[in-house]
Amino acid sequence: LQEAQILKRVVRNRLEENDLKACRILFNRLSEIKGGHVDLHKLVKYGIGFHHAGLLPTERKLVENFYRKGALKVICCTTTLSAGINMPARVVILKDFKRFVTSGCNIQDFTGFFENGDGFSYFKPFSPNEVFQMLGRAGRPGLDSVGYGFVLVNDVQERMWVEDHFFQGFSLNEKLLPRYNELQSGLNNVNTLKEQVLLRIFEDPEISIPSLVKFFERTYFWFLVSKKRSSKWKIPIEQLLMIQQILPRNLLKLHANPRRLQQLKKGNLKTSISGITKSSIQGYVKTQYGVFTCSLDIDTGIQCSCGFQNGMSDKFASQEFAFEFCDHISVFLLRLLNEPNEKFQKFVNDLVPKTIKNQYILTYLIEKGLVKPTTDNKLKCSQFGKLVIRLYLYPTSGVLIRHKLERDNLSSYRSILKAAYEVVKSEGRARGDKMLEPILDWADEEPLETIMERHKVMAGDLYSIKDNLSRIVSFFGIVAQHISISGLDVKDRMNSIAELSETLRIRLHYGIREELFDLVLRLDNVGRVRARTLYDAGYHTSDAVRRENPYVLSRRTGLGVNLCKSIVKNQTRKKNIDT
Ligand SMILES: [Zn+2]
């Protein structure tokens, strides 16, 4: 918001008559929205907007649409916009490469932290992958031949830091290469891929499977993949993208560790096929550690008695697009491919892909009800699919939320919070359950220092988990409402979950119990600590504070007189709880 306010006049001076007209339309549409963001609709008249997780879904959608149309020239946004959706820009400016800054005494584990240069504070930067994912939005396919990405720095030291850590090569020749050669655009992750496919189907009502494939052939992702792979490793794009079934031999080409596969090919591990049915094939692999049972089954998937999770690698951090198989399954697959019998090969080519079916992007989207194939071979987005897109959710997260709403007993704050935490974990934004108890303490108004001390966690981590959780919790509420429309039998239960979620979201956002809602939401300059002070001094409502004389208020609460004056004076303006 701050940045948008600063830029607005510059942007406005460049608008043409028809831009102004379009912006006025957007202004009118935004001002019709109940509970909308006051600052947003005032700003759009200048041709500039902002975008963060706190906006209403309709507001976000309007901002995006009018940006894509070109009416809005600039969007100031948080990482939510750059991480999720197809919003290409000509220029992307990263205002701060420091994810957050904290004092040294808050840090237990210094890995990933860097000194700020002031002798006591430290910062955590965005990872190179994150930075290039954001900057990679620059350059609109089909519209611009180039895109520009900027990273803003405050001084020479910061500039050097950025060059050293995000780029390789020398800055003298003015050519900087991204540090990570392996980086292959955000599509390199199965969650993002599902999202992008869903988005394409959403955006193009006439889309069919062939045109979907064509679209991805034009992406930077495919450009890099096809450049990198030698002809020996080449596989068709629809198989690589898992839009269509993948041949078993291509499956092995995508093995996460090709060298290991070569070794296994040479080694002479004994294998045998022990059983074949119409929908499965079983066998044994004998190693020096024992005999392992391998099973490829359409219903149960790929399984090995060693317990390894065979399937697509989904490492969020490393962005590897590959399959991970245990040695036994790898050897077993090699054995299946080497059977000379033609009829058997046909069987294998048909069966094996089906055993990894929930990895297929399209199959997944269709089976989970996000996409509906039509009779004329087109693909359509379902209501649920559209909802997932509007919420900036990964399809897998949307499906997980719906699954938990339908299957789990979500009747308490704790149960909803735990379910939301699972979703945050599945998105790779949290590891382990370490942050669950600290977050519960936070919502119970424990002082920040106490939480950090008790659970040995850092403030930055707590805040980032808290933000992610309140985002997901609000989606539990929205998806619950969506489900409640679908049937009378679930209506009451879903509506009550939606209410619980909304309350929990506010509790998480502000770190307060319900009794403080009125004070925190309706009074300016009042957060969790001051609200508790006011409440304990007998002021239970914002009205009670409003009616009080500032001097009396100060005496009874111990808060400064000037502060009390400002609290009492500014009470009439209702806070937008999302900012
Ligand atoms: Zn195994």
Image (tube, rainbow, N blue to C red):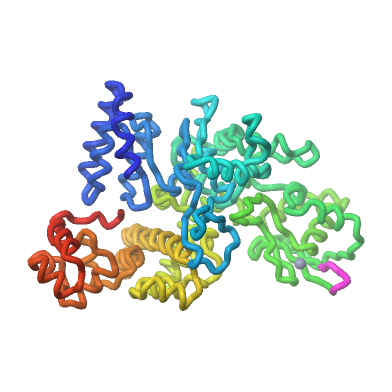
**Vertical relation: 217 (above or below) 574:** above
Residue 222 on image: x %, y %: 64, 37
Residue 237 on image: x %, y %: 66, 39
- Residue in the foreground of this view, choosing between 191 and 405: 191
Position of the N terminus by quadrant: top left
Quarter of image, res 136: top right
Confirm whether residue 462 shows in the render: yes
**Vertical relation: 35 (above or below) 404:** above
- Residue in the foreground of this view, choosing between 349 and 511: 511
**Vertical relation: 195 (above or below) 231:** below
- Tell which quarter ligand 1 is in: bottom right
Q: Residue at x 51, y 53 (%)?
A: 116
- Residue in the foreground of this view, choosing between 31 and 285: 31
- Is 286 contained in the magenta span? yes
Image label count:
0
Q: Left of 169 or right of it: where is 276?
A: right
- Is 360 contained in the magenta span? no
Task: Find the residue positioned furthest to the top.
Answer: 17
Residue 402 on image: x %, y %: 43, 62
Magenta residue span: 284-289
Confirm whether residue 375 shows in the render: no
Q: Left of 406 or right of it: where is 276?
A: right
- Considering the whole magenta stretch, tell me its main secondary structure: strand
Q: Residue at x 37, y 31 (%)?
A: 73
Position of the C terminus by quadrant: bottom left
Residue 564 on image: x %, y %: 16, 64
